[in-house]
């Protein structure tokens, strides 16, 4: 066992008492009986506790693994040249508009708060969100038009760039690719005031990049990435440049190959949301600040595929079958972490998923089987055959997105069995 870095308060006070007793042997009984002499050692011990606490905090704050709060921010700034904006960030996105008549008049959708877009819940269209919306709650949000958009006479479609009025993750709009396009539905976001042409409707929307602020984990990840990626235009520099943007919380990066002369990078925010406008902003920041000679990267979004799982779990003791509520909670947490927290979130293997479920609770003997199921159609999903979760051939063709397997709330339907 290694020697302690700092002494204990007792190890500091004992030599003090020994020195006094050496000069005045009769004082020892007064130290032991709690007399006036003992007040000296108590005062010294109290001072030592304060000083050692300060020193222990300094030692702890010198390591990314242990530092927290303001100490962590100071460490990252001084030793890792990493300073992230502490405030919540704004979400950026795009609204696609359409109108049915080619003979409609021309007009302008002006910038600013004169024509706000309002985030509404499905299916009732209430303007204040819906905490019970599926596949995840819808929080209320309002967006401003970033730049004016001119729609010519006869023009049937247009794209409007928007930015959230209030910073925070509530304005993010995750994209889902399976089943009905729940988060592309035209009633999710609609004009807060009438447009120049009342026949214009919203056909799709995305918004991403809103954050709830910097956490210690986000700052540590950015500092570690900077320590590796600061020395040249390498794959490490790509990660460092990504995490320098505070709102980037999820990413997948694939190095360049002989088939593709650029790295493929996909990003999402803390809500697993990506939008074209936000992805392009991050890509531009990377190109301006991190993309050195010989380093090329192409950016894309992360989209979600809603799933549920059906594991068959064998318990170590039959008595545990009486009430499995606590086991259910642990299995849900382990399954959610499996699909969200792995670096290769874009893929899954049934064997590793079974292992994660088996380790979720000590009362579980093993997980004998598990199925991953499409949350919309109910069809069983096989293991992805490539690292994108798409039909693209890994690192030989560009994939426009990668898939995150989004385990819906209460999406674990477990079957429990007694030990055989």
Image (spheres, grey):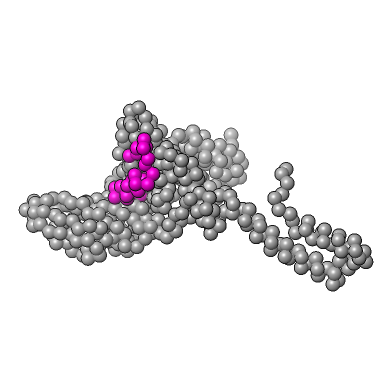
Which portion, as a residue range, is magenta?
A: 273-298
**Picture coordinates of residue 311, whole percent (x, y):** 48, 39
**Picture coordinates of residue 35, whole percent (x, y):** 86, 71
Q: Residue furthest right?
A: 26
Residue at the image point whose x is 66% and y is 57% from the top: 55
Query: Is residue 74 at all visible to an observer of this figure?
Result: yes
* Left or right placement of residue 184 versus residue 213 in this view: left
Residue at the image point whose x is 53% and y is 56% from the top: 74
Question: Of 362 and 111, which appears nearest the observer?
Answer: 111
Residue 286 in the magenta stretch? The answer is: yes
Residue at the image point whose x is 33% and y is 31% from the top: 260
Residue 263 in the magenta stretch? The answer is: no
Question: Of 152 and 14, which appears nearest the observer?
Answer: 14
Question: Of 399 and 297, which appears nearest the observer?
Answer: 297
Total marks in image = 0
Q: Quadrant of the N terminus?
A: top right
Q: Quadrant of the C terminus?
A: top right
Q: Residue furthest left?
A: 103
Residue at the image point whose x is 71% and y is 62% from the top: 49
**Picture coordinates of residue 216, whole percent (x, y):** 51, 54
Query: Is residue 213 at all visible to an observer of this figure?
Result: no
In the image, residue 186 sits, relative to residue 234, either above or below, namely: below
Question: Of 329 and 182, which appears nearest the observer?
Answer: 182
**Picture coordinates of residue 152, whole percent (x, y):** 11, 53
Q: Residue furthest bottom?
A: 36
In the image, residue 248 sits, relative to residue 355, either above or below, namely: below
* Left or right placement of residue 377 versus residue 86 in this view: left
In the image, residue 301 sits, relative to residue 54, either above or below, namely: above
């Amino acid at each position: 066992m290694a020697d302690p870095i700092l002494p204990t308060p007792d190890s500091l006070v004992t030599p003090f008492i020994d020195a006094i007793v050496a000069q005045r042997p009769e004082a020892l009984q007064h130290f032991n009986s709690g007399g006036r002499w003992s007040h000296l050692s108590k005062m010294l011990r109290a001072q030592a506790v304060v000083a050692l606490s300060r020193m222990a905090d300094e030692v702890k704050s010198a390591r990314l693994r242990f530092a927290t709060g303001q100490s962590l921010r100071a460490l990252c700034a001084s030793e890792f040249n990493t300073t992230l904006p502490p405030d919540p960030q704004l979400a950026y996105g795009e609204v696609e508009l359409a109108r049915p008549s080619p003979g409609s008049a021309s007009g302008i959708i002006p910038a600013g708060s004169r024509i706000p877009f309002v985030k509404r819940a499905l299916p009732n269209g209430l303007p204040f969100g819906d905490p019970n919306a599926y596949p995840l709650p819808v929080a209320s949000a309002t967006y401003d038009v970033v730049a004016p958009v001119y729609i010519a006479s006869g023009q049937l479609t247009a794209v409007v760039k928007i930015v959230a009025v209030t910073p925070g993750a509530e304005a993010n709009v995750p994209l889902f690719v399976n089943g009905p396009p729940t988060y592309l539905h035209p009633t999710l976001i609609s004009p807060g005031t009438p447009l120049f042409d009342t026949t214009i409707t919203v056909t799709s929307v995305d918004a991403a990049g809103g954050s709830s602020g910097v956490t210690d984990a986000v700052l540590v990840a950015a500092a570690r990435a900077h320590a590796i990626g600061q020395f040249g235009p390498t794959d490490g520099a790509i990660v460092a440049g990504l995490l320098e943007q505070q709102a980037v919380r999820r990413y997948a990066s694939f190095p360049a190959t002989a088939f593709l002369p650029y790295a493929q990078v996909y990003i999402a925010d803390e809500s697993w949301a990506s939008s074209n406008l936000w992805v392009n902003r991050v890509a531009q920041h990377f190109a301006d600040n991190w993309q050195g000679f010989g380093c090329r990267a192409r950016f894309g979004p992360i989209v979600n595929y809603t799933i549920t799982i059906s594991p068959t779990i064998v318990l170590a003791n039959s008595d545990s079958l009486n009430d499995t509520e606590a086991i259910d909670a642990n299995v849900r947490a382990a399954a959610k972490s499996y699909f969200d927290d792995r670096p290769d979130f874009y893929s899954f293997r049934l064997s590793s998923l079974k292992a994660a479920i088996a380790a979720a609770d000590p009362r579980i003997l093993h997980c004998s089987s598990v199925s991953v199921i499409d949350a919309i159609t109910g069809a069983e999903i096989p293991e992805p055959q490539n690292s994108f979760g798409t039909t693209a051939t890994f690192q030989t063709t560009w994939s426009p997105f990668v898939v995150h397997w989004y385990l819906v709330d209460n999406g674990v339907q477990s079957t429990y069995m007694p030990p055989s």
